[in-house]
Amino acid sequence: MTDQTAGETTAATVPSGPKQRAFAEFWHYYSMNTGAVIGLVVFTLLVLMAIFAPLVAPHLPDEQYRDALLTPPAWQDGGKSAFLLGTDAVGRDILSRLIYGARYSLFIGLIVVVFALSSGVVLGVLAGYFRGWVDALIMRVMDIILAFPSLLLALVLVAILGPGLFNAMLAIALVLQPHFARLTRAAVMAEKNREYVVSAKVAGASHWRMMLVTILPNCVAPLIVQATMSFSNAILEAAALGFLGMGAQPPTPEWGTMLASAREFILRAPWVVTFPGLAILITVLAINLIGDGLRDALDPKLKRS
């Protein structure tokens, strides 16, 4: 009875299905990277904070307190407990604006990555599968985009389209798209001549089925890592455009826009600039740590024994 009970307990602790075993293996390698786990925890807290911003934020992001202009943080002389991180030049609570600003930054990163990933994957699959003039045309356009500094090109595109959050997201997505296209093309070219692809071709599979069903699912791992890195790049680019006045416009509580409106108070009220900068730093660092963990967990060459 004891041996039988022990066997049942062991069987219960081992994932039974292939999906459960795959997830257990993924989490095993991911959790070996302590920084990646910390980054995941921080990013999860940021997401929850953004979702429940109305419940977490002590004040409304645009609410002005005329009797508390440039109030220092609560732990400094002259600070108030009602404004833990102080207020800005027009009396708005910085902590509340940072919490609501997480919504904008995460939304920007998500939309930019979705657009850049979807369009880049389509172009990369077409280039890697058909080769020839299709490959040459797509890759030369991608090379032209990559020849320009990313921030400069995004700035030019926003200047043409007009300042605004949507135009900034569109410009950043176009700038990040070549990275996905080149990565997808390389992965498709590596998979195209493998036995399972040749077998599907002999079986009479159409070109669309070959590209989307047979080849593309085996190219997902590097794309996930690239998407994670592009997420942090999108947040940085959006903050830079907001700082230059070409992204989200005031009074939107976007972190880059908060930096832009506070730069004239760097010496007089440094907390107005410090906390939005720290928010960008912590968010980007957490996402990059997650990307490192995903790379270790998804790339067979980097898995540790």
Image: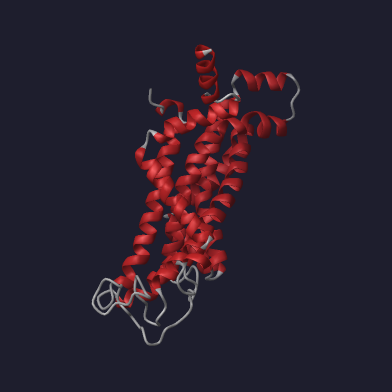
For the C terminus, which image quadrant?
top left
Q: Does any portion of residue 244 appear in the rendered image?
A: no
> As drawn, is 232 to the left or to the right of 268?
right
Q: Residue at x 44, y 70 (%)?
A: 96
Q: Quadrant of residue 136?
A: top right
**Percent x, y for residue 304?**
38, 26
Q: Residue at x 54, y 28 (%)?
A: 22
Number of numbered markers = 0
Q: Residue at x 55, y 42 (%)?
A: 181
**Percent x, y for residue 260?**
39, 72
How are the colours assigned in the image? Answer: secondary structure
Instruction: Please say if 192 is above or below 68.
Output: above
**Percent x, y for residue 265?**
30, 77
Instruction: Please say if 38 is above or below 89.
Output: above
Which residue, as the protein is rendered here, is positioned at the far bottom? 67
> As drawn, is 70 to the left or to the right of 109?
left
**Percent x, y for residue 56?**
47, 65
Instruction: Please say if 193 is above or below 256.
Output: above
Which residue, as the protein is rendered here, is positioned at the far front? 1
Closest to the observer, 227 or 119 = 227
Q: Does any portion of residue 53 appear in the rendered image?
A: yes
Closest to the observer, 199 or 29 = 29
